[in-house]
């Protein structure tokens, strides 16, 4: 830039010649220079102001746009980003079908010590033993006065215990926050829920992992942050579950039984509304498993799923229903029931002498072994085996529990004539009460296969047909007669049209053979028979009830049938079923060839 001189020589000389003041020329030039400088400064200021205005407009526009997007979006909780090394302690709740909490989380604290920071370690040890009587004073003194720098004392403590420890005033005793699994209903549904424990942990947090039941089966799902805290909704009904456990507990006491189990299932969906096994436990304080002896002696043993029992005469409806479906027999077909019946070197007898002939309906109502075996002989071993397999009695149930795969039935490897005979009346094949419930639900479901589930509202594929609807309907009518006129009359609950079958089976000895004074009694049922909605299976382990005239009885009709009847009486109103006046539905009698009107040897 060319600067204009303040006192240009030419103008100064001209001013002197004309008598002007040269200082005026300098003042004029100085004023012009200052005006130019000011103009340039104003231009720079305008430029800076323009760019600052643009920056502020862009910033405020961005903030406004973001606020608009947030205002238009749906509200949601922020999702925590977790790394693989971080301990995830949050675990989803478990609820029943009505949203009532079965398992949840509770904020608690752990207690640990830094012995080198303690002022009075001996006093602290004595005070801790007073607060926690299960601690050993000698062990505490050794840990606090030795060379250890860190000592776990308790993995979880109550608020009252925390306050008591705080009152000790020892700076070396420290607390760590963590969540613990809480089962607010105590023993109710203990075997279904299973329980949880701590996995990876540190002083500030600990992950909660399932150890049994649905807690273990759905462990990954319950711990997945992507579920955003959504609860796992089970098919159980808490009220019905509590009623079942109460009735079974009282029934165990009255019948002097070693154990009891019950399964209540919806016919159409296979959803398990209640499932109990006694004795049970509190999942808040889960006991240690047995390391030796009979697993069923442990309260952790789930008899409904893991129990493998010969379920006795409850199996008799299976060959009868299959034979009806094949057109081999009808309810009125007369069968030779002359006892004893010989198969090879084995003799098969009935509990009572029923004479030379019984109708198929009476064979089921009176529970004739001989009559059932003769019907099974019409089927043949291969067809009988295939039918039982189609009912799911050869494989573990698909129930969503960690114990599910362990409940595989004990099926004979060979299927000769004698095996076919004994399996027909429930001996020689051991299955769980849950298997039996699913099989009876299949018959009650117009012959379409039913698979049990513990998840509420899960869409299940339609089951494949196992029986024709007419044969399934006839089988249900035969089971109804067992309750009204047969061995299960003590399970007849007026107004609820109960259909079912009793079963009494001797318990096998571990060394071979069977006990003479120990058995398992079962009652498998469906109700109401006119439109079956629920299946109930109740089993008692080693029951015995005194008779009025002296002696004792261990049959299903006198032990488990009255317990099942009381259970139906209790839970039917809770299920929304109203008692009705029953109308006797006729049995469907298929036309049979003349040669099959009387089946005999």
Image: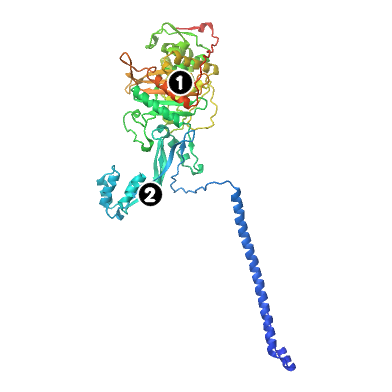
Q: Can residue 514 be seen by looking at this rendering?
A: no
Name the image quarter holding residue 537: top left
Query: Where residue 419 appears, x then y in whole percent?
Result: 41, 17
How is the rendered protein coloured? rainbow
Quarter in which the N terminus is drawn:
bottom right
Against 141, is 23 above or below?
below
Against 108, is 518 above or below?
above
Tag 2 near tag 1, CB within 8 Å: no
Q: Tag on residue 525? A: 1
Label 1 secondary element: strand
| Residue that carries the numbered disc 2 in the rendered image | 176
Which of 56 and 201 lies nearest the eye of the viewer? Answer: 56
Q: Residue at coordinates 47% horizontally, 27% vertically from top-left?
A: 574
Q: Residue at coordinates 61% horizontally, 48% vertically from top-left?
A: 72
Against 436, is 43 above or below?
below
Query: Where residue 69 appears, x then y in whole percent?
Result: 60, 50
User: Separation of disc 2 and disc 1 at Cα?
Assistant: 52 Å
Query: Where residue 97 appears, x then y in whole percent?
Result: 49, 33
Label 2 or label 1, whichever comes before in sequence order: 2
Q: Is residue 244 left or right of residue 11?
A: left
- Disc 1 crowd rating (10 Å Cα; few below 14, some 14-19, many 20+) is many
Q: Is residue 560 left or right of residue 448?
A: left
- Disc 2 crowd rating (10 Å Cα; few below 14, some 14-19, many 20+) is some
- Which residue ends up furthest to the right in the rendered image? 18
Query: Where residue 11 appears, x then y in whole percent?
Result: 72, 89
Which of 248 and 325 lies nearest the eye of the viewer? Answer: 248
Quarter in which the C terminus is drawn:
top left
Which of 601 and 285 lies nearest the eye of the viewer? Answer: 285
Label 2 secondary element: strand
Q: Can residue 565 be seen by looking at this rendering?
A: yes
Q: Residue at coordinates 36% horizontally, 50% vertically from top-left?
A: 175
């Amino acid at each position: 830039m060319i600067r204009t001189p303040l006192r240009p020589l030419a103008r100064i000389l001209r001013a002197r010649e004309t008598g002007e003041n040269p200082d005026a020329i300098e003042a004029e030039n100085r004023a012009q220079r200052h005006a130019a400088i000011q103009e340039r400064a104003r231009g720079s200021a305008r430029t800076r102001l323009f760019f600052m205005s643009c920056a502020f407009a862009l910033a405020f526009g961005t903030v406004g746009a973001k606020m608009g997007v947030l205002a238009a979006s749906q509200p949601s909780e922020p999702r925590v980003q977790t790394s693989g090394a971080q301990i995830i302690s949050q675990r989803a709740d478990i609820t029943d079908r009505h949203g009532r909490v079965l398992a949840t989380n509770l904020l608690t604290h752990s207690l640990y010590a830094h012995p080198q920071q303690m002022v009075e370690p001996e006093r602290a040890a004595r005070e801790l033993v007073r607060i926690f009587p299960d601690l050993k004073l000698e062990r505490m003194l050794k840990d606090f006065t030795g060379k250890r720098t860190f000592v776990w004392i308790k993995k979880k403590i109550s608020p009252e215990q925390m306050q008591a420890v705080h009152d000790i005033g020892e700076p070396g005793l420290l607390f760590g926050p963590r969540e613990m699994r809480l089962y607010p209903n105590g023993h109710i549904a203990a075997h279904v829920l299973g329980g949880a424990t701590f996995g990876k942990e540190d002083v500030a947090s600990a992950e909660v992992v399932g150890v049994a039941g649905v807690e273990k089966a759905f462990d990954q799902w319950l711990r997945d942050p992507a579920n955003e805290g959504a609860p796992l909704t089970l098919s159980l009904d808490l009220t019905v579950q509590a009623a079942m456990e109460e009735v079974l507990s009282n029934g165990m006491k009255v019948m002097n039984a070693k154990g009891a189990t019950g399964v209540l299932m919806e016919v159409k969906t296979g959803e398990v509304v209640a499932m109990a096994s006694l004795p049970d436990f509190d999942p808040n304080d889960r006991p240690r498993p047995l390391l030796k002896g009979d697993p069923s002696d442990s309260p952790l043993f789930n008899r409904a799923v893991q129990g493998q029992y010969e379920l006795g005469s409850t199996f008799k409806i299976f060959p009868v229903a299959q034979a009806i479906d094949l057109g081999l027999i009808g309810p009125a077909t007369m069968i030779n029931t002359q006892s004893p019946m010989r198969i090879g070197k084995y003799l098969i007898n009935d509990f009572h002498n029923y004479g030379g002939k019984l109708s198929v309906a009476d064979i089921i109502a009176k529970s004739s072994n001989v009559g059932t075996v003769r019907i099974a002989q019409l089927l043949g071993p291969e067809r009988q085996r295939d039918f039982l397999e189609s009912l799911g009695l050869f494989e573990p149930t698909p129930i969503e529990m960690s114990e599910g795969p362990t409940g595989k039935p004990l099926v004979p490897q060979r299927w000769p004539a004698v095996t076919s005979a004994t399996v027909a009346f429930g001996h020689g094949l051991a299955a769980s009460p849950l298997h039996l419930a699913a099989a009876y639900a299949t018959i009650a479901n117009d012959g379409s296969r039913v698979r049990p589930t513990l998840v509420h509202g899960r869409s299940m594929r339609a089951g494949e047909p196992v029986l024709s609807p007419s044969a399934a309907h006839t089988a249900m009518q035969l089971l109804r007669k067992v309750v009204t006129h047969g061995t299960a009359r003590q399970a007849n609950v007026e107004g609820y049209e109960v259909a079912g079958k009793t079963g009494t089976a001797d318990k096998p000895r571990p060394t071979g053979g069977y006990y003479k004074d120990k058995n398992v009694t079962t009652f498998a049922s469906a109700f109401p028979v006119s439109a079956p909605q629920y299946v109930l299976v109740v089993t008692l382990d080693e029951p015995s009830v005194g008779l009025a005239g002296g002696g004792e009885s261990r049959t299903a009709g006198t032990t488990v049938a009255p317990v099942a009847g009381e259970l139906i009486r209790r839970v039917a109103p809770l299920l929304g079923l109203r008692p009705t006046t029953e109308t006797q539905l006729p049995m469907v009698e298929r036309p049979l060839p003349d040669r099959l009107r009387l089946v005999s040897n």
